[in-house]
Image: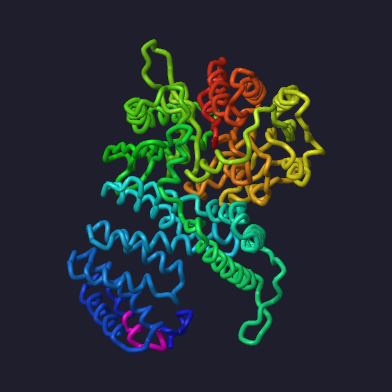
Amino acid sequence: MLLASSHPDGLFGLFPPIGLTILLLHAFGQTNEIKYLNEAISVLRNVLKIPHAGDIHLVATRQLISSLSTRLQLLHQREDLDELMQLFPTTVNVKHARIPERFQFACHWASLAQNSNHPTTQIAYESAISLMRDSLTFAPTLEVQHFRLIAMRESYEKLPLDYASFQISTGRLEQAIETLEQGRALLWSEMRGLRTSVEQLRAADSHLAEQFAAVNRDLETLTMSGGSIGIDDVEVDGRKRMDPFSRLVVQQRHLLGKREKLISQIQALPGFEGFLKSPQFDTLRSAASHGPVIIINHCEWRSDILILLHDCPPSLITTAFDFYDRANSLKDQLLDARKEGLDSKRYEDALSSVLKELYDLVGRPMIQRLCELNVPQQSRVWLCPTSVFCSLPLHAMGPIPSNDGAKQYFLDLYIPSYTPTLSSLIESHKGGAETFETPSMLLVGQPDNSMPEAFKEVQVVQAIGPRVTSLISEKATPSTVLERLRDHQFTHFVCHGILEPGKPFKASFKLYRGMRLTLLDIVRSRLPNAEFAFLSACHTAELTDESLADEGLHLAAAMQYCGFRSAVGTMWAMADTDGRDLAGNFYKSVFSGRRERVPHYARTAKALRDSVKRLRRKRKVTLERWVNFVHYGA
């Protein structure tokens, strides 16, 4: 009974063939003699012939897949590959198995199928993408969802990039763009779905619209709080006692069931057939309605650059064979040098080297293609990076050779912004009627002795005019800030920004007496009047090593999610000496009368670009100080 007691469900001890398999595989591991692996595979095949043994079949199939994969790596026998390709669909579609486990098998299937050019590659990837989204849907809170992402981060990070590269390799560029949109920023996507507008639905069926809005509100409360929303203890097997997490799961399943039924009813209405379905390419291309969007797919199979335009097919730039490894090296180089401090010569030299290499790797072919596509210089362009490129300063690639010998960078030629996904950019261009009046602004300031120059930045913002409301020092508490954000279109934060490694929802602004306004606090807010946020604090657009790059879990993205059309953030710690001049030049540009028929939020990308260029020209301003500032959104 040793095997039974060593395994959580005692299955190996209760079913001798499984126990025998474990012993044979252990012998193979100790001796590397293939006869033990062959015998284990034979035993497992016989187990699968036993009728009416569902759970045991599942255990045996898992182990058989693992054993055949090992033998395939050693002997490269075609019959092992064929057997695996028959086993994978069976395992992936076992409905009573855990979804995360089915997802892992689907990823294994897709990888092996693509590597062997097997005809099931497309089906394998489609199964994996579907299970990836399901595996998050059935996690009750944001914290649990993020934990699940981290636990299987390699699969979650690689899958959409791998699938997109496969589609690109077969000439299906539009489908690749759809895949990248489906498989990235999963948490933001799930949360955004809970805030789906019901205005059009209300005109068709007001009762259904109210039901759908109500269940979304309940799910959002549950997802973002981790606490109960009022459903009493549920009776299970005649007992009423449940642990808190189980109660959360039951609550969530109950609400998800209601929501799925409502979605089916909505999709049955004329004109609502596509309601809440994954966006198709014809919808996604509207992200480029104000300028091209440049997607960089960083993938081990093959990496590519896609330029999305609103009025013609996507343009593909293929990359060199070493593109993937060089990009990884650039991120490692930058992070390693940062350990010696942002003001160290080593970091300055590393950043200079990285910007130059980024131009060779990405900038040169990208600029050449933009010229071929007749995209004029000084146009708005959006950068939509994946993987390691989410942590690299693409907006400042260079220097770029010029006729007069002056140093030029990417932001000298174009007006760059970032977007984590196409959907978030489309959302930032939506909204009510455009207004050209001077927006109201909320100034949140918490300068202290460690950032003495920040007081001057506060004064510069206050001097903008009478429409500035100031919450400074003791007035800047989290609850007051959240309340007043609802009343203002623009907001400007001057305070410390704090990162919590491995806990992205704990990233925060440090306010009065050290109180924190966290990313999760911001995400819970609904700010219908919000247009633009200037986050003059450290780390507001930075991802920690423990974060998933393609989830984009930082403060600037959170501001976009809760309603702001655009935001300025920082890629690392900022020097408080830069805030005054940068803010002064920025708002002078935004509020000048030269672009009267352009909404003020839409002026912010150019205003940041021009202000950063002026900062760059100041004496003794290092690279890291001006490269630090980035623009997100419209």
Of the pair 423 and 570, the residue shown nearer to us: 423
In which image quadrant can residue 355 be found? top left
Residue 221 percent across, percent down from the top left: 67, 60
In which image quadrant can residue 538 be found? top right
Magenta region includes residue 15: yes
Residue at left offset 37%, top offset 44%: 298
401 relative position to 438: left or right: left
Residue at left offset 70%, top offset 41%: 510
Q: Give the extent of the magenta segment.
A: 12-21
Residue at left offset 78%, top offset 43%: 480
77 relative position to 144: left or right: left
| Quadrant housing the C terminus | top right
Magenta region includes residue 514: no
Residue 432 percent across, percent down from the top left: 63, 40
Vertical arrangement, residue 99 with respect to residue 595, above or below: below
154 relative position to 571: left or right: left
Residue at left offset 55%, top offset 28%: 605
Vertical arrangement, residue 142 with respect to residue 105, above or below: above
Residue 30 is at least partly visible in this image: no
Vertical arrangement, residue 513 with respect to residue 348, above or below: below
